[in-house]
Amino acid sequence: RHELRIAVKKLRYAVEFFGPAFEGRKAEKRRRTYLEALERLQEHLGDLNDVAVGRARLEGGAAAERLTALLFGDADERRLLDEAVDACDDFADANPFW
């Protein structure tokens, strides 16, 4: 997930840089939709990465296990994963603007 997040981030920056080269209302609308989908995907992948890093740092000891369960419960992680999948679907459905 971390590598995917970095690839999405690079693609987003490329779209932000090269996007204005494609003129016209249709291209602008598609670029905006494409960029919004990328931003949302990057955000959700970042949230999942935060959970993974937080878990790794809190591992060890009974108190750490309770804190980990409180902060990063399975339901919350599942919700984050579902949101990331939805964002990925939106990105896959976005029409290229070029």
Image: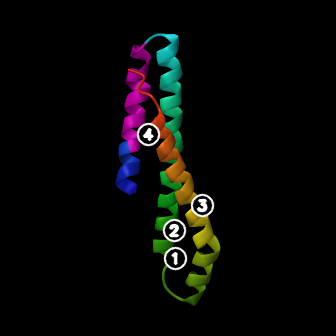
Q: Which residues are magenta?
A: 8-22
Q: Which mark is residue 79?
A: 3
Q: Nearer the viewer, mark 4 or mark 2?
A: 4
Q: Amino acid at mark 1?
A: Leu
Mark 1–mark 4 Cα distance, whole angstroms, equals: 35 Å
Does residue 41 show up?
no
Q: Amino acid at mark 2?
A: Gly
Q: For the residues labelled 1 and 2, say whether their Cβ atoms are less than 8 Å apart.
A: yes
The mark nearer the N terminus, 4 or 2, is: 2
Q: Which residue is mark 4?
A: 92
Q: Nearer the viewer, mark 1 or mark 3?
A: 3
Q: Amino acid at mark 3?
A: Arg
Q: For the residues labelled 3 and 4, say whether their Cβ atoms are less than 8 Å apart.
A: no
State the SS at label 2: helix
Quarter of the image with the N terminus in it: bottom left
The mark nearer the N terminus, 1 or 4, is: 1
